[in-house]
Structure formats: structure tokens, C-alpha cells
Amino acid sequence: IITGGNYVLEMDTGFGDGFTLDDAQQGILNNTTFVLDGVDQFSEITNNVTSISAFRGKKNVLDSIAPGVMTVTAIDTTRAFDPFNESSVYYDTTDDTPGLSPLRQIRLSRNGDYLFKGRVIDFTYDYGTAFTKNVPTVLITCADDLFLLANTFLSAFTPSVELSSARVTTILDKAEVGYPAATRDIETGTVTLGAYAVAEGTSVTTYLRAISDDAEGGRIFVSRTGSLTFDSRLGNTLSSPTVTFNDTGADTKYSSLYVDFSTDQVINRATVERFGGTAQTDTDSASIALYQTQAVVKTGSFLETDAQALAYAEYLLDPNPEPRFSGVEVNFASLTTAQKNAVALLEIGQTIQITRSFSSGSPASVTQELAIEGIEHSIDPRSGHRMKIYTSPTTLVFELLLDDAVYGRLDSDNVLGA
């Protein structure tokens, strides 16, 4: 796409270059084609793609992160994706499996950097009609590996008392899960989880989400490069935006900017109850008087003590709504090459800065630094690449600068470093 970059969509064909005993094609061992330590073989399927849409993360702050999803629409004049076509180049002759079959790996890259990694979970094939000149089309639906974990279930066991991050590792290491260690990015947790029994048949994703949402207060998601990522409790963020957006032309341009200022942001009563513990509640009476009771309740938390449950309730309290930029949309056609490269590689959890200028009223401009919670790509060969970034508020601190009138005082706002 001239205005966006070089995009490549690849799918695991399923048969790879591994040696298969007695197979007519893959039963010949040599140095170049089929080898004992074979790897997955990916084939490019970009040519006939007419649109790609991908989303990871969440759009609203209070939502739980679900598996990332990518949908691909393509025309198929050669029946390459037709599951009944045994002559397709993607057909796996070793086990008579169509190339476009469930759980095939799929990956999207731009200029060599991955934007999405996942697996095919569904596809809809349409042979077309006379009205459409009988041109077959296919809609491919893909999901990242949180989908696999949602369909993986734990055997009953009782874990040890351990940090939240250690519990995540314990779950991923279980024999029935076996999540690859090479594709994990686990940040050290801030809370201790109790030795509570895990019920037979518990969904892995459900359990991991309970650690993140109901105990740690962090994030769990699959990165654009395919790594399962666990972020610890979200706290102060050292001011250092990855990308700076504004509407003056001085930095990265945006095409649309969205504002959130509603009671949905308010939490003035928070209750957290751990397994076998007493419910711990924190409230803000002044906020309740203004906005009525806006409550969040978390029961069955894995936190080890009531003291930790109370600390989490206090953390969850957010009594006073403030207007914030909740999302920003970017059209790659309006960006420089360097700006496109920076925006394309943004990741959940990073910080961005957004400035909006005004021709009337006061102040003349508003600038906010915000955390990224969700990333959405819309890629079309005709209209180019658009990207929407969903945000959440973050508490900023700044690095201490000696002799500076503003940043030279060591306090709650200025710190020695990250």
C-alpha cells in the first residue's frame, strides 16, 4: 500500500519442512527440502486480500481484555482456500487437511514488523453468484493465543502462596497448558495470592483474568509479536511518551480525537472480598453526594489477606471524573515514513501524548499523556491504513532535573528515575 507500507499476510500451511516417514513427498530426507528438525512453513496469502481488520486490548477502561481478533476478506479465483480443493497449494497431503483449517497459525506484518499473530478460528467461504460473476470470496476470522487458553482447562490442584506473577507462571507451566516459555513476558507482581484450590475444568483465560482484574490490577494480553504479556499493578508512569500526537503539524497528525467525560468513569464505592475473607470496602461520600453511588464489587479474589483486599479497594476508588481523550485515530497517508513506523509499532501499556488546539475559548490547547489500552487496525488496498488507539488515564511523574525550577524538587511528582 503506497501510503502505508509493505504488508505481508502469511499462513502456516500445516506441513512445513519436517521429514515424515513413508510419505510420498516428505519421506525423502535430504539437506534442502525435508529435515528431521523441521519447522512450520508459512505461505504468503497477501495477493488477493481486499481488507484486513485487527483489534487487540480493550476499548473501555473497566472492560476485561478478551482475545485479540483479526478478520481478513479475500477473493479466491483459483480456489486456493476452498477446503474441498485437494489441488490447492495449501492442502496438506500428509493428513488430507485443507490449508485453511482451524487453528492454522497466521501472521500479519508491515515492513517486516509484526502487527498481529494468531490462529484461524473460523472462515466463511462464498462461491459467488452470477451477479458477482461467480467470483469466490472468503472471510477468515483469526484470534490470538488468549483464544487457545480460553479453550484450555486446568486439572484440580492447590497452588502455593506466591506472587501474582509467579502464579501466572505456575498456570502456564501446568502440563495441560504447556505455554511456550519463549513467548512470555511476565512482569514481577506486587501482591501475594493465597493457596486457594483451583477447581477441575477451570478455563485458563478465566483464571489468568481473575489474577489480573480481581487481585493484581494490571493487564494480561498477547502482544503484537505473539508474547503473552502480564503487567503488574498500574501505578505512576514516568513521563516519556512513545509517540506525540497533535493537530498543529509539529508532531504526528491525527484525523479524529474522542473525548470521554461521563459517570462511567466514576467509582466511589469499591468492595473487594478474598476467598474466606471479610469484604473490604472503601467509599467517597462527597462523590456519592454528587454522582450517586457508582460501585464496583470484586468477590472471590485470590489475594492472600484482608489487608491486601482493602488496599486494592482503595486503589480502585476513582471518585472524581475528569475529561480525557479516550481515543485517537490516525491515517497513515498523512504521516511521514518515520511517523508511520513509530505509530505502527505502538503497544498496549505504552504511553502517548495528545494535544488538541482551539481557535476560541480557554485554554488555547489541552495536552494529556495517556496509557494505551486497545489498538485497532483497518487496512484496505484502496483506502490505505488507518489505526485507532484507545486510552486510559495515567498518573505521571517526572524525572528529577537538578537546578530546574519545576523539576528540580524531589517530591511525589518528581522522581530520581524509572
Image (cartoon, grey):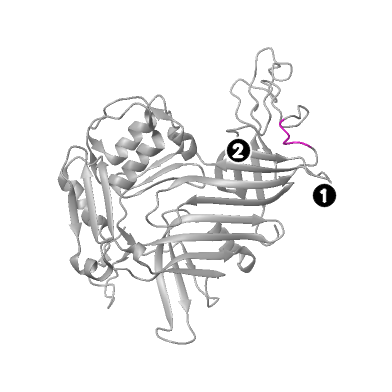
Outermost residue to the top: 22
Q: Residue at x 27, y 45 (%)?
A: 215
Q: Position of residue 340 (x, y in %)?
A: 58, 61
Determine the secondary structure under disc 1: loop
Q: Is 45 on the left or on the right of 327, as rendered?
A: right
Camera-nearest residue between 381 and 271: 271
Q: Which residue was labeled with disc 1?
A: 131
Q: Amino acid at mark 1?
A: Phe
Quick one: label 1 or label 2, which is nearer the N terminus?
2
Q: Is residue 401 above or below residue 1?
A: below
Determine the secondary structure under disc 2: strand
Residue 194 painted magenta: no
Find residue 354 and report its image quarter.
Answer: bottom left
How many callouts does the rendering have?
2
Q: Residue at x 74, y 46 (%)?
A: 48
Q: Residue at x 82, y 44 (%)?
A: 134
Q: Is residue 364 above or below residue 350?
A: below
- The CA span between labels 1 and 2 is 26 Å
**CB atoms at circles 1 and 2 under 8 Å apart?**
no
Q: Is 159 on the left or on the right of 49, as rendered?
A: left
Q: Position of residue 376 (x, y in %)?
A: 54, 55
Specify the segment rendered in magenta: 79-83
Instruction: Point out which mark residue 379 bears.
Output: none
**Quadrant, the N terminus:** bottom right
Task: Tell me the chief SS of the magenta region.
Answer: loop
Q: Position of residue 364 (x, y in %)?
A: 43, 84
Q: Which residue was labeled with disc 2?
A: 122
Q: Position of residue 21 (x, y in %)?
A: 65, 13
Label 2 environment density (alpha carbons within 10 Å; few <14, some 14–19, many ≥20): some
Q: Amino acid at mark 2?
A: Asp
